[in-house]
Every structure is written in C-alpha cells, then in structure tokens.
C-alpha cells in the first residue's frame, strides 16, 4: 500500500515490502539502496550524516526542523557524509545560524547524497519499530519519473548489513597523528601541546570528536587502519589502545579485528572501546553479538552504570548489540540501557580493559560520560607508576 503522494513528487522511498512514500527530493539525484533507520536527536544532523557508523544506512530524522542551522566544516565527523541518504518531515528552510558556511541542500548535492522531504516520518518510524529496520531504495528525479517496481526489486535484492564488513570501507588508508582537542569558546579547536600518554587508536570508522576527547584527556594519539596487526599496534609502544566506533556487522569485522585484539590484550595494556570497538572487545573476550530489531539511534538514551547507580543521558548509534548472556567468566556488564535492558558496557575484572556501547564524545548530557576518557587516562597513568 502506498502513502498518499503530492501532485508532483520528485522523490520516493520504496520499502522491500512494497510500501512507497513520495515526497520532494533535494540533494543529489539518482537512487541508492540501504537499510533504513530512524534517529530521534533534535540537533546534530550534520554530525549524524558524517558519522562513519551510518555506512550502509539511510537516516529518517524524527525531528522536523532539519537544515535550519546549515552546515559548517567544523561539525564534520569525517571528510564527507557517510550515511547513504536522509528522510525528513519538512523540506529544509534556509540556514539561520552564524556558524553556517553552506546550505544543507547544497552540501548534500556537492557530496552526492540523496534526500527526501515531505514524508510522514512518524508513520515511517512506527513501521520501523514494529517491523524492524527495512531494506529500502531512495530515488530523486526532478522530473518525477520513477520505476516503482524496479526500486522495490532493488530494495528486496539488497543483501543487508548482516555479514557485511564495512569498517574496511570507512577506515583511514594509512596511519596519522591527531592532536586537536575539543571545541571551546572563544578560540574553537585548540591543540594538545603537552600530552602525557601515548595512545594507538584503531580506526573502524572513528569520529573526529572521539579523537578530540582523547587529546583533551592528555593523549598523544596515533590512528591506525582497521586492519592493523597486533605487531603494528605494539610497535608504537603505546601506553593504551583505543578501539573506535564503526559500521557493519561486528562478526564480519571481527574476522581480522578479534585476533589482533586478543594479542594486544596479552600485553596487559589499558584498552578502551566505543560502539563497534565495544563489540570487537566483547567478541575478543568470547562473547557474541546479535542484530537488533531497529537499533538505537538518538541523543536521549538513558544508560545506567551498575557500580554507581548513575544514569547518563547518552548518544547512541548501533544496530547490533553485545549479548550479555554470553559474557564469559571474568567479564562483567558495567552499563545497561534503561530503554530495553540491552548491554551498554563491559569490563575485564581486575584489569583496565573496558568498553561502552554509547558515544561519550557526543555530549548529549552534555558531560555525563566524559569520565570514561578520564578513566582511560588514569589507567595509563597508574600503569606507568605501578
């Protein structure tokens, strides 16, 4: 059954079950196929679109005012948008923000990302929650010519994220150093000029603000590609190892990441993981991951830390989760989602090895979770003085 169409639709979203949503296209033209998810955040659409964890996904924004603050290079989490496309309720208005350097529509056109406006995003979100994240085809044609049967067939034929390793597609091509710290008024991004700890960050699709948080916590950061071996990681003689966020099926990325992490763990270094890095650490320790019905995507997710009872308001973006029932002896669950009880953190008993599912660098709380970076720095300091 198709949603009611405007008189001259220039874009359409075709779901694998045959449902079609029509609207107004903006950004690039053409069509793309991906998994459809929804994000409930009220701000940060640019950070969301440039988050490498959204590779292979089209994002439905539940907040209607998308585009009203424009875009600025300062807010990019990576060089260009990684999400395949966007779905919004209202067509973007002109930007009204002193930091804006470009309109959202122009930015999407320049970077080759398709978008559709005028969609009943509430209905679409309900469908995703009830039926799971669907495979979809998103098309934009200024003339409004669409082959619906062909688009539905493309959506049905897409293989999906299960079994798909996308970290190799979004990781860095070669190693590099990072010293930029978090944005602060009035000077913007400062540089870390007196680092105390050497950190190797393994890039499965790392967001820039994670690297900034590491630098702000006193770290001299060297970023290595996702396929780095344990020998390459340890050759930098790091004080600690960080495992970044990223897209795709953790079990697929784990084919090469897990052996590396298991060898690094033998070096008895502090290890800290976020998002996909959390899932990689869990797999390396012997746990399993599962595909979620519609995942967690938003900036208002309450997460409870078991040790303190503290509830943090967190930012999340993941479609897979660690199965807490499979955690082996000696590995503890540290955090849990108060939305659905799913696992949001683990640690190795008696060792400075831990990870979280949420994104402490995204600051929705705004500072609820920054202690995780400070805890990592403290663990490295303690190891030096032990």
Image: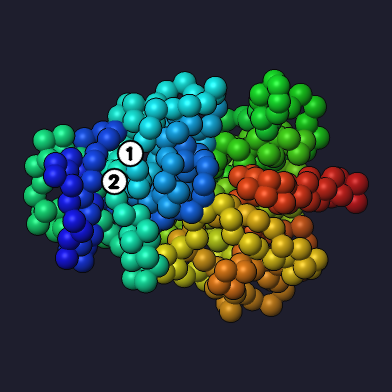
Instruction: Specify whether 111 is left or right of 148.
Output: right
Where does residue 248 sit, x and y in percent of width and height? 42, 55
Asked whether residue 264 appears in the rendered view, the answer is no
| Other-residue count near label 1 (Cα within 10 Å), few / some / many at <14 / 14–19 / ≥20 | many
In the picture, measured across the screen, residue 148 lies left or right of residue 380, that is left
Along the viewing direction, whichever of 47 and 69 lies nearer the viewer: 69
Assess disc 2: are there few (<14), some (14-19) or many (≥20) residues with their C-alpha within 10 Å of its C-alpha: many
Res 201 quadrant in image = top right
Residue 117's disc is none
Residue closer to the observer: 351 or 126: 126
At 9% from the left and 57% from the top, the residue drawn is 149
Q: Is residue 90 left or right of residue 319?
A: left
Q: Are marks 1 and 2 in contact (CB under 8 Å)?
A: yes
Q: Which residue lies at the image location 47% right of the left edge and 37% below the top edge? A: 46
- Residue at the image position 50 percent from the left and 68 percent from the top: 289
Q: Which mark is residue 118?
A: 2
Give the CA separation, mark 1 to mark 2. Answer: 6 Å
Seen from the viewer's position, the closer of residues 328 and 15 is 15
Residue 125 vs 176, above or below: the answer is: below
Where does the image place residue 311, in percent across and percent down from the top left? 72, 62
Mark carried by residue 91: 1
Colour logic: rainbow
Element under disc 1: loop
- Quick one: which residue is furthest to the right in this view? 385
Can the viewer see residue 315 in this picture?
yes
Q: Residue furthest front?
A: 7
Q: Quadrant of residue 381?
A: top right
């Amino acid at each position: 059954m198709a949603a009611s169409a405007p008189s001259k639709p220039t874009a359409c979203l075709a779901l694998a079950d045959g449902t079609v949503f029509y609207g107004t296209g903006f950004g690039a033209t053409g069509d793309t196929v991906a998994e459809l998810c929804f994000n409930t955040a009220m701000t940060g659409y640019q950070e969301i679109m440039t988050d490498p964890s959204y590779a292979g996904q089209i994002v439905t924004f539940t907040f209607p005012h998308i585009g009203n603050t424009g875009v600025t290079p300062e807010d990019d989490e990576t060089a260009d948008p990684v999400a395949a496309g966007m779905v919004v309720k209202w067509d973007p208005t002109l930007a009204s923000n002193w930091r804006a350097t470009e309109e959202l529509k122009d930015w999407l056109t320049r970077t080759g990302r398709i978008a559709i406006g005028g969609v009943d995003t509430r209905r679409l979100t309900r469908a995703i929650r009830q039926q799971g994240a669907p495979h979809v085809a998103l098309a934009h044609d200024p003339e409004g010519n669409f082959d619906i049967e062909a688009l539905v067939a493309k959506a049905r034929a897409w293989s999906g994220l299960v079994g798909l390793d996308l970290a190799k597609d979004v990781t860095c091509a070669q190693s590099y150093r990072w010293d930029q710290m978090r944005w602060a008024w009035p000077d913007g991004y400062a540089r870390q000029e007196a680092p105390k700890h050497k950190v190797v960050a393994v890039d499965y699709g790392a967001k820039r603000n994670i690297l900034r948080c590491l630098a702000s916590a006193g770290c001299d950061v060297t970023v290595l590609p996702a396929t780095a071996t344990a020998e390459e990681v340890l050759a930098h003689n790091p004080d600690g190892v960080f495992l970044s966020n990223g897209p795709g099926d953790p079990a697929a990325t784990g084919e090469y990441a897990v052996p590396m992490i298991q060898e690094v763990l033998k070096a008895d270094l502090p290890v800290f993981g976020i998002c996909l890095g959390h899932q990689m650490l869990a797999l390396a320790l012997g746990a399993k991951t599962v595909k979620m019905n519609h995942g967690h995507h938003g900036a208002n997710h309450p997460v409870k830390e078991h040790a303190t009872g503290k509830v943090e308001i967190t930012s999340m973006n993941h479609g897979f989760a660690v199965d807490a029932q499979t955690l082996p002896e000696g590995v503890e669950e540290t955090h849990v989602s108060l939305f659905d009880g799913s696992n949001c953190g683990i640690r190795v008993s008696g060792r400075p090895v831990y990870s979280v599912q949420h994104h402490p660098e995204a600051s929705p709380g705004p500072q609820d979770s920054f202690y995780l970076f400070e805890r990592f720095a403290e663990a490295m300091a303690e190891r030096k003085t032990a």
